[in-house]
Amino acid sequence: MTRLYFIRHGKTEWNLEGRYQGAAGDSPLLPESFVQINALAEYLDGTSFAHAYVSPLQRTRTTAKTLLHDMATTVPLSVMPALREFNLGLMEGQKFVDVEAKWPQELYAFRHDPANYDPRPLHGESFPQLLERMTPAIQEAVARDETGVANLLFIGHGASLAALIQHLVGTPIAQLRKDGGLTNSSLTIVETTDGANLPYKIVKWNDTHFLPGKRDASDTI
């Protein structure tokens, strides 16, 4: 049985400001994020990983390097381009309130009705396009584990990981948002006995109980 541990990156300056980052936008981690990543490392202490994969964006790479350093592990770390965040097109860099004013229909569908999300006015990426680029990369990573019993670590982004994980466990596109989003520095775990075929099985969703402090609306997307 292979277990996949999905981590959302630490909270960033744009997260705090309520700005969409997406596939091209980026901003530094907040100082408090390093404390939370350390808490996550302590929670994962004793868990051995065969390999770690990270999105190419700086906020995820900083999260991954900090996490592995705090875990005092030498697990191999590979950049996986397919883990990049949603391409949000014209939304990227803009504040949530401004996006809601300019594209209320698109924003509502993106957050609540993914089957009807049409990103063409935004020059962005659809949910089917996202899943088509992400899913094969995850299955290939699982297939590379010849033992079939390894733990694999994936450090990515809130919107894309939430959609991907729901897809891996068999959730239809219309219901991809049924459990809400993912919180910064959160942990979600799925497992599979046959990585070539879906669905996988969800073990833990958006676990944050190990994080210090209180969460607020800007922590989750």
Image (tube, grey):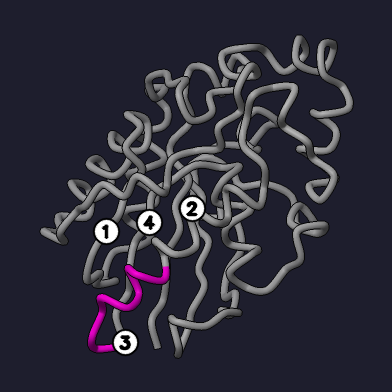
Q: Residues within 10 Å of mark 2 (few under 14, many from 20)?
A: some
Q: Which quadrant would residue 64 be assigned to in this image?
A: top left
N-terminal label among 1 and 4: 1
Q: Which residues are magenta?
A: 139-148
Q: Amino acid at mark 3?
A: Val
Compared across the picture, whether 97 is left or right of 191 comes to right
Tell us which disc is closer to us: 3 or 2. Answer: 2
Q: Earlier in the sequence, mark 2 or mark 4?
A: 2
Extreme right residue here?
105
Relative to 115, 32 lies left or right: left
Residues 17 and 117: in front is 117
Residue in the picture at 63% in, 29% down:
124
- The nearer-to-camera label among 2 and 4 is 2
Image spot of residue 77 (x, y percent): 19, 53
Is residue 140 in the magenta section?
Answer: yes
- What residue lies at 23% left-to-right and 65% top-to-bottom? 51
* Residue with the mark numbered 4: 154
Residue 152 found in image quarter: bottom left
Numbered disc 1: secondary structure: strand
Q: Earlier in the sequence, mark 1 or mark 3?
A: 1
Badge 1 vs badge 2, beta-carbon distance below 8 Å: no
- Under mark 1, the amino acid is Ala
Asked which secondary structure carries label 3, the reply is loop
Q: Which residue is mark 1?
A: 52
The residue that disc 2 covers is 133
Tell me if label 1 and label 4 are in contact, CB under 8 Å: yes
Is tag 3's residue or tag 2's residue first in the polypeptide sequence?
2
Position of residue 159 relative to residue 42, above or below, is: above
Q: Which mark is residue 149?
A: 3
Task: Work out whether mark 4 precedes mark 3 in sequence or the reverse, and give the earlier one.
Answer: 3
